[in-house]
Amino acid sequence: MTHAGRPLLYKTVKEMKKIIDEYFDWCDNRTKKVYDEKKGCEYMITDPAPYTMSGLARRLGMDRRSLLNYSDREQFFPTIKEAREKVQEDVETRLMEKAPTGAIFNLKNNFDWKDKTETDVNLNKPLIELDTISK
């Protein structure tokens, strides 16, 4: 398949994979400063960042749509598929741990769950007679 447009930012899968691995490593090892009032000092704690497709694309120097377009290229497809699956797993895990509405959204959109509404229609109840007005 011939692709037109801008030249590729990444000529090889190895180049792209290196940046992808750096992104996930950065997310896993992100830290933040915390102040301990009792001890009167600051210290660093690990605060992993969530994986996102937008964050991955930005790290690669492109937008999310461009990243997805790379997966149309046979040589990049497996690498991008693996990265997408890693992001998806992280998002799913975080939804299940912290956001019940997010978990519901995920179940409906990815696993065909549906809201169920039940209506009790009892045909054995007596009819209510209405007065009619006639001319």
Image (cartoon, grey):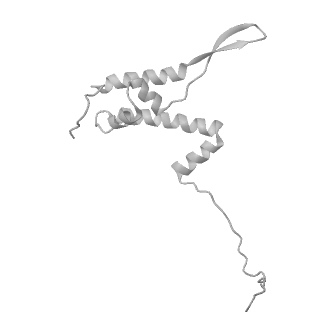
User: Observer-nearest residue: 105 or 17?
Assistant: 105
Q: Residue furthest left?
A: 2
Q: Residue at x 27, y 28 (%)?
A: 8
Judge from the rendering whether residue 97 lies leftward or rightward of residue 4; answer left or right.
right
Q: Position of residue 21 (x, y in %)?
A: 43, 23
Judge from the rendering whether residue 65 lies leftward or rightward of residue 111; answer left or right.
left
Classify residue 115 by image quadrant: bottom right
Q: Position of residue 106 (x, y in %)?
A: 56, 45
Numbered-mark total: 0
Q: Position of residue 38 (x, y in %)?
A: 79, 10
Classify residue 16 by image quadrant: top left
Q: Residue furthest bottom?
A: 135
Judge from the rendering whether residue 19 lies leftward or rightward of residue 3; answer left or right.
right
Q: Residue at x 35, y 34 (%)?
A: 66
Q: Residue at x 57, y 23 (%)?
A: 48
Q: Position of residue 113 (x, y in %)?
A: 57, 54
Q: Residue at x 75, y 88 (%)?
A: 133
Classify residue 4 by image quadrant: top left
Quadrant holding the C terminus: bottom right
Quadrant holding the N terminus: top left
Q: Residue furthest top?
A: 40
Q: Is residue 122 above or below residue 109?
A: below
Q: Is residue 120 above or below residue 46?
A: below
Q: Is residue 71 above or below residue 59?
A: below
